[in-house]
Amino acid sequence: MTDDVSRNERIKEASDYLRGTLADGLREEITGAIIEDDAQLVKFHGMYLQDDRDLRPERTRKKMEKAFAFMIRVRIPGGVLTPRQWLALDGVARVYGNGTMRLTTRQTVQLHGVIKSNLKATLKTIDAVLLSSIAACGDINRNVMCNVLPEQSRAHTAAIELARSISDHLLPRTPAYREIWLDGERIAGGEEEVVEPIYGKTYLPRKFKVVVAVPPSNDVDVFAHDLGYIAIADASGDIVGWNVTVGGGMGMTHGEKDTYPRTADIMGFCTNSDAVKIAEAVVTVQRDWGDRKNRKHARLKYTIEDRGLDTFRAEVERRAGVKFAMPEPFAFTSTGDRYGWSEGIDGRGHLTLFVQNGRVHDVAGAAQQAALRAIAHVHEGEFRITPNQNLVIANVPTIQQAEIERIARDAGLLAPWSGLRRNSVACVALPTCGLALAESERYLPDLLTALDERLAAYGLSADDIVIRMTGCPNGCARPYLAEIGLVGKGPGRYNLYLGAAFNGSRMNKLYAEDLDHAGIIASLDPLFAAYASERQKGERFGDFTVRAGFVAATGNGADFHANAGSQQQGATR
Ligand code: HEM
Ligand code: SF4
């Protein structure tokens, strides 16, 4: 390995397939942390070393170590859990974690606040219900997402099957996870190439994210991910194949114009039998072509920008031994969830619940965690986590529907929220995320209350408007694909982005910088007023802000930064 690769590349190479010194570090009792190199490796095992940022000032004053604890992210392809698995996660959250569960924008569950000495017990409990956290974070293929209601047609069934096949196929083969966390014996290894046939010793240059979408729903936000599959079905609902997308990604860094969020390109159409082969080829091309010197330029989106889609496609075709056909037509209508009951093709019901920002907890007047536990005790179908941090109680027979609905209603999981709140997503941010520059999950609900008042004044309370907030520009809540995107800049300050398409096909554009609470409301209020009086029939808020000249429409790649901030430069209208 050459000298000029990034530090993480050296850590991976020296890690002996993700072992590092994690096993020793766990036994070390003088600190609640682990050494820096292992903190990079533990991500591949689905964990982040964090500290409670609310407690930092006090602990620094008292010369105490930071309040270290781990975030554990579970691997849940398509977000589908059995009630027993739900109960196990709820149990470990309460016994070993901070008491709450966090449903994420990539259909997994995160547990926060697990201290080092409880990690093994937590992972063993998860293992006992056939779940794991392997490869939930790190430079590797992570949780594979899938459209949330697979039972609605045969296309949906094929979609979850594909999501699971890709997830299994791209799992790391190293036994390190079992050895370290589940007390597995170390098996004397064979040849290195056999250990990780797809990834090799240094895995991928950066994280890698795969999703499977079933039109007309784009709930998975297919264009935000490295690799995507869009289901193409025939008139009877059977899958004929997939449009394959590559090169989406959200993260960027404030002030660095050569970093940008990007929507994926459609590479072509493939048959179902070629889909997994193509996933492997895309992964290995990115493994070999991705930038291993600069982590800020290491995602597949930059490989595609630098090499061009045609060159990339040709190499994927060569490695997979397949030829893409021209993409098939498809149409997405929205990225949101369909709340309330919907019926599957077999007559069973699916109830979509609203979980504010995905935080499952019990608060005064709304014991939602207890309610979901009660549902898990009677429910025999599944719990499905949506990409909007909500939850579907799926496959409920008619006879149980009234009882489950009553439990959910009593806990405020079915409340009649405004069109803005129904379409809101916030990342975790403070106090756990070490990268947060501003609040997100703890602030968005209050901001929504203030914005709801303004919307009500213009008769817009029921209109679906997508709003997403993150505490930093990394983009965990996909804010650049929201009609209203708010991205943390510093404590109490946000950049405001506008003009994304409602169906997730076009990103937004920077409209105003460094706004505080009053500034956000003052910026949005006149836009709401104009939307109420000037919108065309059926026109979405994001499309309106572009047509009315508040922001320019965003193209792809570096164009994200072009013509930004029309408010500062004087509105173009
Ligand atoms: C350089 C880019 C990124 C970094 C360094 C990063 C890092 C992190 C960290 C540290 C957390 C843990 C926060 C906590 O639970 O306390 C987190 C959460 C999360 N991230 Fe990222 N992230 C990045 C970009 C993204 C993107 C682009 C997505 C998805 C499109 C994403 C998806 C998530 C999800 C689903 C969570 C869980 C919580 C939630 O739903 O908000 N991340 N990320
Ligand atoms: S967007 Fe930033 S602040 Fe929010 S969870 Fe991701 S890394 Fe943390």
Image (tube, rainbow, N blue to C red):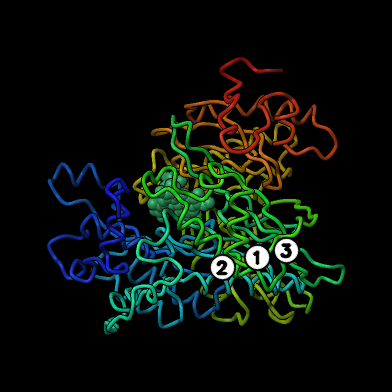
Asked which secondary structure carries label 3, the reply is: strand
Is the shortest distance between ligand 1 and the CB of mark 2 under 8 Å? no
Circle 3: is it few (<14), some (14-19), or many (20+) Cα within 10 Å? many
Point out residue 299 in the picture as x, y percentages from the top left corner: 48, 49
Residue 339 in view, yes or no: no
Asked which secondary structure carries label 1, the reply is: loop
Using the image, tell me which numbered label, if any, was put on residue 239. none
Question: Amino acid type of disc 1?
Answer: Val
Q: CA distance from mark 2 to mark 3?
A: 18 Å
Question: Amino acid type of disc 2?
Answer: Gly
Q: Is disc 1 in contact with disc 2, using a CB cutoff of under 8 Å? A: yes
Q: Residue 374's quadrant in the figure?
A: bottom right
Q: Is residue 438 left or right of residue 39?
A: right
Task: Between label 3 and label 1, give the one nearer the viewer.
Answer: 3
Q: CA distance from mark 1 to mark 2?
A: 8 Å
Of the residues under marks 3 and 1, which one precedes in the sequence?
A: 1
Q: Is residue 434 above or below residue 69?
A: above
Circle 1: is it few (<14), some (14-19), or many (20+) Cα within 10 Å? many
Pointer 1 residue? 148
Circle 2: is it few (<14), some (14-19), or many (20+) Cα within 10 Å? many
What quarter of the picture does the N terminus occupy?
bottom left
Q: Is residue 208 above or below residue 78?
A: above
Pointer 3 residue? 231
Pointer 2 residue? 79
Point out residue 285 in the picture as x, y percentages from the top left corner: 51, 58
Q: CA distance from mark 3 to mark 1?
A: 13 Å
